[in-house]
Image (cartoon, grey):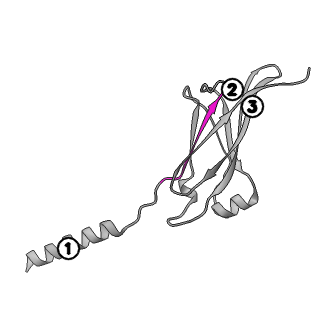
C-alpha cells in the first residue's frame, strides 16, 4: 500500500513540475558605440517610456519606468524589467533611449534610439553616439 502511495505521489510531483510555467526574465541590454562602432565606456544611458501608451501597455501601477545607468568597459548597460510583467502578459512597449557622455566644456557625445520591450525576452538595442558641440 505504501508503495502505491509513493508512486502516485511521485507521478503527481512530475506532472505538477512540468505543468507550472515559469516567468522568464524581461531584460533590456543597451550597447553604446561610437561612429567607428567601438564600444564607449562612461556613457550615461537613460531608458524611459516613449509615450503614455507604453506605460499603459506595461502596467498602469508599475514602478518608475525611468531607468539610468553608466556603461562599463564593454560599452553596455543592462536593465531588468521582470517585475513589470505578469505571467502570460502579451504585448510589448517601445522605450526611448538617450545616451550622453561629457567630453569637456561644451562638448559631448550624444545619441538616441529606442528599444521594443517584449515580455520574457532578452531585448537588445544599439545606440550610436556622435560628438555634439555647443555654439561658443
Residue at image point 25% right, 68% down? 14
Extreme residue in the front direction: 36
Residue 67 falls in image quadrant: top right
According to the image, label 2 marks what residue?
35
Label number found at residue 68: none
> In the rendered image, which quarter contains the N terminus?
bottom left
Extreme residue in the bottom direction: 1
Disc 1 versus disc 2: distance between alpha carbons? 61 Å
Q: Secondary structure at mark 3?
A: strand
According to the image, label 3 marks what residue?
110
User: Which segment is the magenta one?
Assistant: 25-35
> Which label lies toward us, 1 or 2?
2
- In the rendered image, the vertical position of residue 60 relative to residue 32, given as above or below: below
Q: Is residue 102 left or right of residue 16?
A: right
Q: Secondary structure at mark 2?
A: loop
Label number found at residue 9: 1
Q: Is residue 34 left or right of residue 79?
A: right
Between residue 73 and residue 127, name the one nearer to us: 127
Asked if the magenta segment contains residue 115, the reply would be no
Label whose residue precedes the other's in the sequence (3 or 2): 2
Q: Position of residue 50 (x, y in %)?
A: 73, 52
> Which label lies toward us, 3 or 1?
3
Residue at image point 75% right, 56% down? 51
Label whose residue precedes the other's in the sequence (3 or 1): 1
Label whose residue precedes the other's in the sequence (1 or 2): 1
Amino acid at each position: 500500500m505504501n508503495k502505491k502511495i509513493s508512486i502516485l505521489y511521485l507521478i503527481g510531483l512530475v506532472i505538477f513540475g512540468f505543468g507550472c510555467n515559469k516567468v522568464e526574465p524581461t531584460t533590456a541590454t543597451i550597447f553604446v558605440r561610437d561612429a567607428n562602432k567601438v564600444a564607449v565606456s562612461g556613457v550615461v544611458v537613460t531608458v524611459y517610456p516613449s509615450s503614455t501608451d507604453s506605460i499603459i501597455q506595461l502596467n498602469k501601477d508599475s514602478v518608475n519606468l525611468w531607468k539610468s545607468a553608466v556603461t562599463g568597459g564593454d560599452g553596455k548597460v543592462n536593465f531588468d524589467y521582470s517585475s513589470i510583467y505578469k505571467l502570460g502578459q502579451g504585448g510589448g512597449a517601445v522605450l526611448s533611449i538617450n545616451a550622453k557622455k561629457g567630453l569637456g566644456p561644451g562638448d559631448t557625445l550624444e545619441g538616441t534610439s529606442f528599444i521594443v520591450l517584449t515580455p520574457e525576452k532578452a531585448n537588445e538595442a544599439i545606440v550610436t553616439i556622435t560628438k555634439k558641440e555647443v555654439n561658443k
